[in-house]
Each structure stands twice: as C-alpha cells, then as structure tokens.
Amino acid sequence: MKPFRLKSTLFLIVFVLVAVDQLTKWWVETRLPFEEHVGVVPFFALYRTYNTGIAFSMLDWMGSNGLVVLTVLIIGFLIYLWSRVPRDHQLAHLGFAFVMAGAVGNLIDRASLGYVIDFLLFHTQNWAFAIFNMADAFITLGAIAIIIDEIFSLKGGPSATDTQKHT
C-alpha cells in the first residue's frame, strides 16, 4: 500500500472507531438507566456507569484534569511509537489505529464530562468482569494486534524494510 493511501486509510479507521465509540456512549446515556443491570444474554449485560479513573478505576485520585493531561501525554507517546513502525507491518499499523481511537474516544469523554461512560458487562452468577466501553475494547484489540505483529516479526526475523535500512 502506498504511504499516503496507508495513512489516509488508517486515519479513516481511527475516525470511524471514535465515531462508533461516541455514538454508542450517546445511545447509552440517552437510553439506559443509570447503574441498573439490563440483561442481553445470560453472561452479558448493559450497565451504565461512570469511571473517574482509568482502567479498573485506577488513578482516580489524579482528578479529571490530571487524567486528561496524562492521556494527552500517552497519545503523544503512541504517535511517536506508531511513527517508528515499518510500513510493511500492516497489522501493527491497524493495532495502533485501534489503540489511538480508543484513547481519543475516552479522552473526549474525560475532557467534556469529567469521567468516562462505561456500559459493557460480562458476568456469571458469581463473577463479573470490570465494566468497560467500546473505546476500551478498541484499545485491547489494538494491543493484541500489535503484540501478534511483534511475535510474527520476531519469528520470521527482520522484515525486508528492516534489512534494507541496515545495508
């Protein structure tokens, strides 16, 4: 894929995923009761709640403004890491697009509302996973894609792009 085409495609993916995240949060905010279990299937429910921290409510002591600054710094670091990915590592690029979309989606919430809207709940009768949102799912899927790309890169040795840089 040509460099411009790759970048424009990845930008479009980020834009679409942020839009999906924000639309689902808008739907949840306008349609679901607050902190009430709405069963979908026996192991999955919708449960609207607010997270004032980051993953698993960590760092909520930093407050909204502190977490906004931290998130912006993390996004800057992600951009730096993403810029160093060789062009032929398309799975890693896709992964970074997903991570970036998730980070931006949650940043929008935190900057505009002071918290992140969470609503996806996987559970059993005796156990429940942390409530999360689409942005969190995008971050997780993106991280998995980046790790898979890295594993395959290590297994296959340096890519053609890496070899050409060192000759």
Image: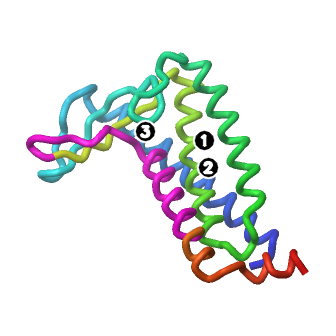
> Are dots 1 and 2 in contact, CB under 8 Å?
yes
Which label is found at residue 100?
A: 2
| Main SS, magenta residues | helix
Highlighted range, magenta:
124-149
| Cα gap from disc 1 to disc 3, whole angstroms | 13 Å
* The stretch drawn in magenta includes residue 136: yes
Question: Distance from label 1 to label 2 (Cα)?
Answer: 6 Å
Q: Secondary structure at mark 1?
A: helix
**Dot 2, crowdedness within 10 Å: few (<14), some or many (≥20)?**
many
Relative to 144, is 120 above or below?
above
Q: Residue 72: image x %, image y %?
A: 68, 34
Q: Is residue 70 left or right of residue 122?
A: right
Screen quadrant of the N terminus: bottom right
Which residue does the numbered mark 3 point to in the structure image?
A: 25
Q: Are marks 1 and 3 in contact (CB under 8 Å)?
A: no
Q: Nearer the viewer, mark 1 or mark 3?
A: 1
Q: Quadrant of the C terminus?
A: bottom right
Q: Which residue is mark 1?
A: 104
Q: Amino acid at mark 3?
A: Lys
**Local crowd at mark 1 within 10 Å, few (<14), some, or many (≥20)?**
many
